[in-house]
Image (tube, rainbow, N blue to C red):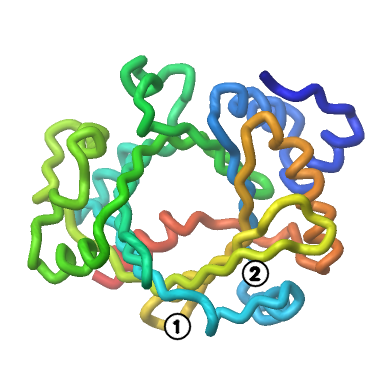
Amino acid sequence: MQLVQDPATKADAQQFWQLPGRELDRLLASTRHADRVELKLVVPTTAHEATCASLGVDFSRASARKVYFLDTADLKLKRHGVVARVRSVEDRADDSVVKLRPCAADDLPARLRRSKRFGVEVDAMPGQFVCTGAIARRLGKNDVRKAVRGERPLRALFSKEQLALLPGRTRIGDLSIFGPVDVRREKILPLGADFRLAVERWTYPDGSSILELSTRCAARAAVPVAAQLASVLRAYEIDLTGEQQTKTHTTLSYFHCAG
């Protein structure tokens, strides 16, 4: 059940979402069918250093992660709204995920919505949002590295349930590996916040990078958390008006062009 929000709280949340009236209504409607919401902000490149300094983030202390996306040479998965990603994390188990993005949660097959492994999330950035359905899988340590090196099959990184989300007639052998991206991530508790903020830097082989701030919450709490997030970011003098981009699109475009 959704929480009843007062107009002032909704107006404060809108300072983060920055959506036209009808789009804001669509966003709020989409949360009624979601399990959780992730609020994201991509920081302009020129503000990366100042933002990290303001938040007290030092990535030299963060564990290293390597992220890879899988797609065909002509990006068939991307064109069909499917994302396949694997990730290796220093000192932790690897993982894989297959996502349907965008998806209409109320139109999903009943078998998916019944699955305990399938989750629906609304990803919301200033000026845009998308509903995503996903199945994640926990892997063993070094599983991703072995698959990338050709020491084990890529298929071993995904469950049958995950592979069933791939577009029709797409086989795992049709997919190429796009990556890696070097990822560093820290979680902090900002002053004035009731939530933890993830600060994540994705660095590409040419040295370019994306800096993203994010927090997750239950779908029913999206409005008050967005309102508080807007207030917290303003207090840290972090600009909410910069151009937004998704890590998936940026990564696939980068390596597709490089290839």
Q: Secondary structure at mark 2?
A: loop
Seen at 84% across and 57% down, the residue is 192
Seen at 79% across and 41% down, the residue is 13
Seen at 67% across and 19% down, the residue is 1
The residue labelled by disc 2 is 44
79 with respect to 54 (left or right): left
Q: Secondary structure at mark 1?
A: loop
The residue labelled by disc 1 is 207
174 with respect to 47 (left or right): left
Q: Quadrant of residue 165?
A: top left
Q: Nearer the viewer, residue 8 or 205?
A: 8
C-alpha separation, residue under disc 1 versus residue under disc 2: 15 Å
Rendering coords of residue 196 (x, y %)? 67, 56
Q: Is residue 137 visible?
A: yes
Amino acid under label 1? Gly
Amino acid under label 2? Pro
